[in-house]
Image: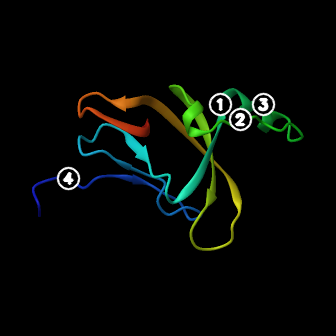
C-alpha cells in the first residue's frame, strides 16, 4: 500500500522484538533497549551441546566480531526477569553499515 516492502524483524516468544532491518534491507540491527544480549561463539555452543556439563563462554555486544553466535537474552520488560539461552544462531556480518553511513549496534542476517 505504501509502495515499499515492510521491514523484517527478529523476535520470539521470550523476546518479542530482538532486531529489525535497516531501511536499505541489508541485514538487521539489534535493539538493546529491550533486552540484555549475550553471545556464545558457535564453537562454544557446539561444545556445550556435545557436553551438557560444559559452561560456554559468552561475549557482550562490544566484544563481537563478524561470525556466528548463539543468542542469549535477558528480558528487561514484561514477564519474569530470566536469562534465556534461545538456541538461535545469528551471523554477525558487519559492525557498521557503510552504504547508509551509520554505526549500528551489531548488524546480522
Q: Residue at point 43% right, 29% down? A: 93
Q: Residues within 10 Å of mark 1 (few under 14, many from 20)?
A: some
Farthest right residue in view: 53
Give x and y (percent) for residue 8: 34, 52
**Could you say which disc has been placed on residue 63 in the image?**
none
Q: Quadrant of the N terminus?
A: bottom left
For the point 23% across and 40% down, which residue is it? 24
Alpha carbon distance from label 2 to label 1: 5 Å
Q: Quadrant of the C terminus?
A: top left
Callout 3 secondary element: helix
Q: Are marks 3 and 4 in contact (CB under 8 Å)?
A: no
Residues at badges 2 and 3 in contact (C-beta under 8 Å)? yes
Q: How is the image coloured?
A: rainbow
Numbered tag placed on residue 47 in the rendering: 3
The span from disc 1 to disc 3 (Cα, nearest Å) is 9 Å
Confirm or deny contact between disc 2 and disc 1 (CB under 8 A).
yes
Q: Give how far apart the Cα atoms at labels 4 and 2 are.
A: 34 Å
Q: Pinpoint residue 53: horizontal percent, then vertical percent.
A: 90, 40
Pointer 1: what residue? 42
Between the residue at mark 3 and the residue at mark 4, the CA separation in whole angstroms equals: 39 Å
Amino acid at each position: 500500500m505504501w509502495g515499499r516492502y515492510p521491514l523484517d524483524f527478529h523476535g520470539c516468544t521470550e523476546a518479542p522484538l530482538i532486531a529489525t532491518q535497516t531501511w536499505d534491507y541489508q541485514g538487521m540491527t539489534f535493539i538493546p533497549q529491550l533486552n540484555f544480549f549475550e553471545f556464545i561463539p558457535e564453537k562454544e555452543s557446539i561444545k556445550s551441546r556435545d557436553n551438557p556439563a560444559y559452561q560456554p563462554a559468552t561475549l557482550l555486544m562490544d566484544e563481537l566480531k563478524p561470525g556466528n553466535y548463539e543468542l542469549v537474552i535477558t528480558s528487561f520488560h514484561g514477564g519474569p526477569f530470566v536469562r534465556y539461552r534461545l538456541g538461535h544462531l545469528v551471523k554477525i556480518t558487519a559492525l557498521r553499515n557503510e552504504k547508509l553511513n551509520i554505526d549500528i549496534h551489531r548488524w546480522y542476517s
